[in-house]
Image (cartoon, rainbow, N blue to C red):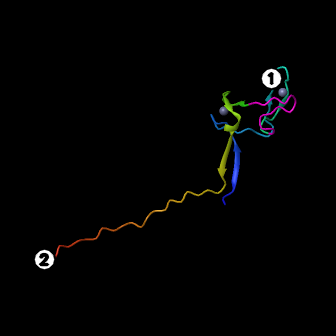
Amino acid sequence: MPKRKIEIMCPKCLWRPKPQSMWQCRPDCGHLWNTFDTGGICPACGCAWKQTKCPACHQWSPHGDWYKETLGDERVENRQADATVPATVRPRRG
Ligand SMILES: [Zn+2]
Ligand SMILES: [Zn+2]
């Protein structure tokens, strides 16, 4: 089985959040936290954020779209069939 790896990146601009990246909850809550530590749920008020705004491109994307599953050591094998060599057909006369 190939190793599976989850990478978090913005679906729009492929920006990757850092561990110290912070998101802010609603103004009445105001809590700052890394939304990817909790799956988009504010630890202060329990509000579940279904959309996450990218600090790089300022676009909202569904939280689940930020998780990209990649196969760690995936190799693209470009297997080619053995090339067929055209045979020289000599018409026989006889
Ligand atoms: Zn909150
Ligand atoms: Zn972005």
Horizontal and vertical percent position of residue 88: 25, 71
Q: Residue furthest right?
A: 44
Q: Residue at x 72, y 31 (%)?
A: 50
Give the numbered dot on residue 93: 2
Q: Main secondary structure of the magenta part?
A: loop
What residue is shown with label 1? 26
Task: State left or right for residue 84 relative to residue 80.
Answer: left
Mark 1 or 2, nearer chain start: 1
Magenta span: 37-49
* Residue at the bottom extreme, as displayed: 94
Q: Is residue 39 magenta?
A: yes
Where is 87 relative to 31, above or below?
below
Q: Quadrant of ligand 1?
A: top right
Contact (CB < 8 A) between labels 1 and 2?
no
Q: CA distance from mark 1 to mark 2?
A: 91 Å
Kindly identify the residue that appears in the image at 70 percent across and 39 percent down. Answer: 16
